[in-house]
Amino acid sequence: QKEVEQNSGPLSVPEGAIASLNCTYSDRGSQSFFWYRQYSGKSPELIMSIYSNGDKEDGRFTAQLNKASQYVSLLIRDSQPSDSATYLCAVKGYGGATNKLIFGTGTLLAVQP
Amino acid sequence: GAGVSQSPRYKVTKRGQDVALRCDPISGHVSLYWYRQALGQGPEFLTYFNYEAQQDKSGLPNDRFSAERPEGSISTLTIQRTEQRDSAMYRCASSDSYEQYFGPGTRLTVT
């Protein structure tokens, strides 16, 4: 079982719709969760972080975390063609000396005009 | 302010040569991370530093890979006796807390 799993997509949504991106993780002790957006040929850009169960909203983005189900999601409201990118879920483990992030393979989002 | 910078942005080297990749973190960031990203994959952890101390090098693939951050700022990732399988995008990230910010990466091609 991979440590962080995402559906590779592509996830295709029409402009103006809600895009829902999902991620599951295997380490029950994980404490910190991040969503990065990566445009083709560019570096990952941090868009959301979440540390507590529940929802966290930032503009058109909402991150949702359910530690009991080991599930984290990202909702993008009013999707725009400029949102078309690969979205990477990253998880930071618990304990020890390391702060490394473990990434999923990413979900490719395509927003259709 | 200035973000994370990396140099060179592209490096082509012949198999067997040594290469050194440089990372200059965001000013004041204590932690610096090295990742490697293959096409179609998420970044894969290599090593990280707090200040000048290497805290975790569990992701370095073998002893041809090493990293240093002697003054707690700029870091160098060195790959000795490069092999074709080392070809990848090498990414550096820095952090002052939990959130990590990535640089533009160095595309390494070993011929």
Image (cartoon, rainbow, N blue to C red):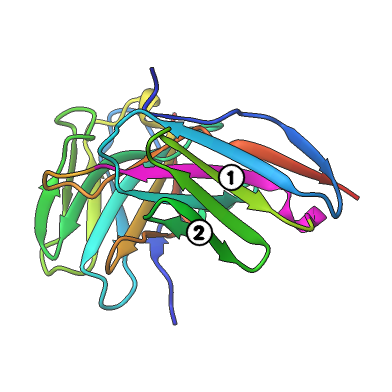
In front: mark 2 or mark 1? 2
* Both labels 2 and 1 in a single chain: yes
Residue A95 relative to residue A19: left or right: left
Whichever of labels 2 and 1 marks the residue nearer the N terminus, that label is 2
Q: Quadrant of residue A110?
A: top right
Instruction: State the mark number for residue A48.
Output: 2
Q: Nearer the viewer, residue A71 or A93?
A: A71
Vertical placement of residue A30 versus B105, above or below = above
Who is closer to the viewer here, B25 or A103? A103
- Kindly identify the amino acid type of the residue bearing the numbered disc 2: Met
Quarter holding residue B45: top left
Compared to residue B40, the image places residue B108 above or below, namely below
Q: Is residue B49 left or right of residue A40?
A: left
Task: Give the extent of the magenta segment.
Answer: A79-93
Residue occupying the far bottom of the picture: B1
Q: In the image, B97: left or right of A55? A: left
Which percent across, then down, holds residue B102?
A: 42, 58
- Give the secondary structure at mark 2: strand
